[in-house]
Amino acid sequence: MAFESLTDKLQNVFKNLRGKGRLSEDDVKAALKEVKMALLEADVNFKVVKQFVSSVQERAVGEDVLNGLNPGQMVIKIVNEEMTALMGSETTELKLLPINEITVIMMCGLQGAGKTTTAAKIAGKLKMKGRKPLLAACDIYRPAAIDQLKINAEKQQVDFFSMGTDVSPVEIAKSAIDQAKKNGNNVVIVDTAGRLQIDEAMMKELCDIKEAIEVHQSLLVVDAMTGQDAVNVASQFNEKVGIDGIILSKMDGDSRGGAALSTKSVTGKPILYVGMGEKLSDLEQFYPDRMASRILGMGDVLSLIDKAVEANAERDAEKDKEMAAKMKKGKIDFEMYLESMKQMRNMGGLSSIMGMLPGMGKISDDQLPDEKKLAKMEAIVLSMTPEERKNPKLMNPQRKFRIAKGSGNDIADVNRFIKQFDQMQKMMKQMPGLMGGKKGGFGKF
Ligand code: GDP
């Protein structure tokens, strides 16, 4: 799982900080030295690390944190906030012209970064938002790339445009726009050729396309697994071609975190999306605050909710909203558990979901409950009365006994399940504070 080692190391530092009632300046310095090492090992750019550590230190010492209540937790809060700021603070949306105009998006990146896949992923997202995208194949050097884009366009049920491999990319791009006008497409996504490494010819081709047609958004796809290399690639593309935003692909792999944490600081360009898998639905909006929480091992409940809503687009929107609001407040009940079990099957499996829950990121696949155990837990909830499901506090020994009997389980199984549920609920309750919402909530962490 991405960031695993960085998250582990940071959590260890935090554990030591929390364990201390009072903190001296030297304690903070020692902790930040460890944070620095962890970030460097995660392949975060050296200058970025230096700046980050000095900002945290300045605030930790300057804001009278050390004399206040819970100084350890306050330092962690500062780390969380500074890490969010490092990644851009605000979420950057893809900029689109009004629906009656044609927005042109040019995809660029090295070969294998994930350009073609991401182009189709974005087309799918835009289609869901009511746009009518056209995918244009301008990689004339690899016929396989054209086929791949065509297949992906078919899968996404969006329009596709190609002129084969004998016409120049500039001509194809121009014709694609003509085609879009005729066909009523309001977004053209131009998939360009990549090379194994940065070279002049590739850069020139991209600049030529930009000169020939009006490109509204140039998006660069970089492979998150390549750490600082990804950041260097981004800097060079930005210098030579000019980019508007970055997409970090392969964040589902064991990326160490360097690319996510350094890209914005080094290039000045925001990360728009992260690729979370090979499937065409595996593209997530990038939220700096949620990513910081994920890296710090505090989970990412909000992305989990988004995932649930997207996976169940046809479901009852009101019910989803209600569930999201409850989760944000840290209120979960057995009814929601049942609902989540149903949704989980549509959401890419338990391990990807667990990675987003606070404290659960470190669980490996073999530690996860198998389908049989899940069915057992589901049976326990199904044996509860509607009141019990809505109000977990009603649980008492008689009720547990009845539920055990009704679901064909031992009372020990029921107790274990309810205990796990309690723990999850406690973790969820800590989330609003951790997310920077309710003031002081962090103290409970
Ligand atoms: P291009 O050469 O830049 O167009 O790259 P492709 O779109 O062909 O992608 C290269 C490989 O990376 C393919 O096997 C994709 O399925 C895979 N890929 C792309 N994005 C992701 C991602 O977010 N996660 C994972 N695991 N694989 C990805």
Image: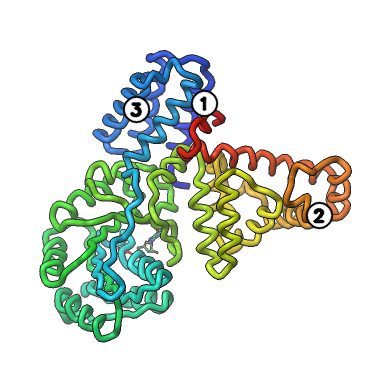
| Labels 3 and 2: the sequence-earlier one | 3
> In what element is the residue under mark 1?
helix
* Dot placed on the residue nearer the N-terminal end, 1 or 3: 1
Q: Residue 166 occupies which quadrant of the picture?
A: bottom left
Between marks 1 and 3, how big is the CA–CA gap? 17 Å
Q: Residue at x 54, y 31 (%)?
A: 445
Circle 2 crowding by C-alpha within 10 Å: few under 14, some 14–19, many from 20: few
Q: Is residue 248 above or below residue 142?
A: above
Q: Amino acid at mark 1?
A: Lys
Q: Nearer the viewer, residue 382 or 349?
A: 382
Element type at marker 3? helix
* Observer-nearest of 370 and 170: 170
Q: Position of residue 228 (x, y in %)?
A: 28, 44
Q: Nearer the viewer, mark 1 or mark 2?
A: 2
In the picture, measured across the screen, residue 402 lies left or right of residue 138, that is: right
Amino acid on which the number 2 mark rests in the picture: Thr
**Residue 438, horizontal then vertical, whole percent:** 50, 37
Circle 1 is placed at which residue position?
15
Quadrant position of residue 247? bottom left
Q: How is the image coloured?
A: rainbow
Callout 3 amino acid: Val
Image disc number at residue 56: 3
What is the tally of numbered marks visible in this picture?
A: 3
Mark 1 vs 3: CB contact within 8 A: no
- Which residue sits at x=12%, y=64%? 207
Which residue position is annotated with label 2?
385
